[in-house]
Amino acid sequence: MKNSLILLIVTAFVCSFLLIGTPAQAAPSLSPTDTIKQAVNEVMNIMKQPGITDPAVRPSLLKKIQNLVQNMFDFEEFSARTVGPQWRNFTPEQKKRFNTAFADLLRALYIEKLEGYNGEQVEYTGEIKSTKGDKAEVQTSILIKDKRVPVSYRMLVKGDVWRVYDVLIEQMSLVENYRGQFRDIIAKGNPEQLIQRVEAKAEEIRKQNASGLPTKE
């Protein structure tokens, strides 16, 4: 039940970031917190459009959301941190395929769970930057059924942009949560089997999202 709650919250809000410039190279036009607010509003506006339930229009609207999500994560960093020490055993080609598959999975899960968004309130409670200014954590609180759930978004600077590399729900790390699942798969198999599992799951959810049907548990 707790994992389901984590997945619901993460996939509904984890991708709520747009890129901003690093303080060292260009002053961002928005703070990390304001950037999140803007991104959330933009995605929610897409989901509120009448065409989201129209099979003829839905694919183009979902594509807009996917494009937003694509620019919100450093998927390579996310993949490396999630797989953990076993990442060094992946070949360059396997790393590339896993990055693509994991990015597809996160985008698909985000859109799937976004369907269940019922206007839950999001409060932005704090923003912390590292001493060097190369990392940041945006703290929020989401009200779900009279319960406030703390959610923290961790970002780091890559090049001249901020990208998400982890999310904490009630102090539980998304990276660590997935790492546990992936570790079990790799322990019983190999990198190729993990890639195939992630690819298959992403494809399954993506097809159901396109049809507007709920995903089977």
Image (tube, rainbow, N blue to C red):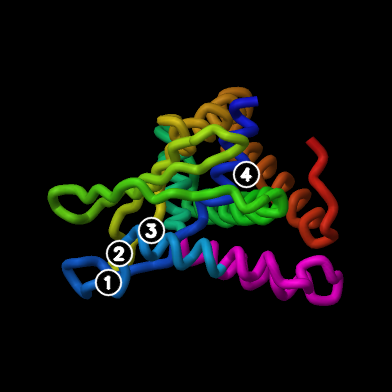
Query: Mark 4 is on which residue type?
Result: Ile
Q: Residue furthest front?
A: 146
Q: Nearer the viewer, mark 4 or mark 1?
A: 1
Please name the residue shown 26% across and 51% down the image. 135
- Crowdedness of circle 3 by 10 Å Cα count: few (<14), some, many (20+)? many
Asked if residue 24 lies left or right of residue 192, the reply is left
First in sequence, mark 1 or 3: give its number.
Answer: 1
Asked if residue 200 lies left or right of residue 77, the reply is right
- Looking at the rendered structure, the secondary structure element under dot 2 is loop
The residue tagged 1 is 28
Query: Mark 1 is on which residue type?
Result: Pro
Is residue 97 or residue 123 the one in the foreground? 123
Range shown magenta: 43-72
The label on residue 163 is 3
The residue tagged 2 is 31
| Rendering quarter of residue 170 | top left
Query: Mark 2 is on which residue type?
Result: Ser
* Label 1–label 3 contact, CB within 8 A: no
The quadrant of the image that shows the N terminus is top right
**Residue 110: in magenta span:** no
Q: Position of residue 156 (x, y in %)?
A: 31, 53
Separation (CA) of disc 2 from disc 1: 7 Å
First in sequence, mark 4 or 1: give its number.
Answer: 1
Asked if residue 148 lies left or right of residue 46, the reply is left
Q: Is residue 52 above or below residue 198?
A: below
Separation (CA) of disc 2 from disc 3: 13 Å
Please name the residue shown 35% across and 58% down the image. 33
Q: Position of residue 88 (x, y in %)?
A: 41, 40
- Looking at the rendered structure, the secondary structure element under dot 4 is helix
Q: Is residue 199 above or below residue 181?
A: below
Separation (CA) of disc 1 from disc 3: 13 Å
| Rendering quarter of residue 31 | bottom left
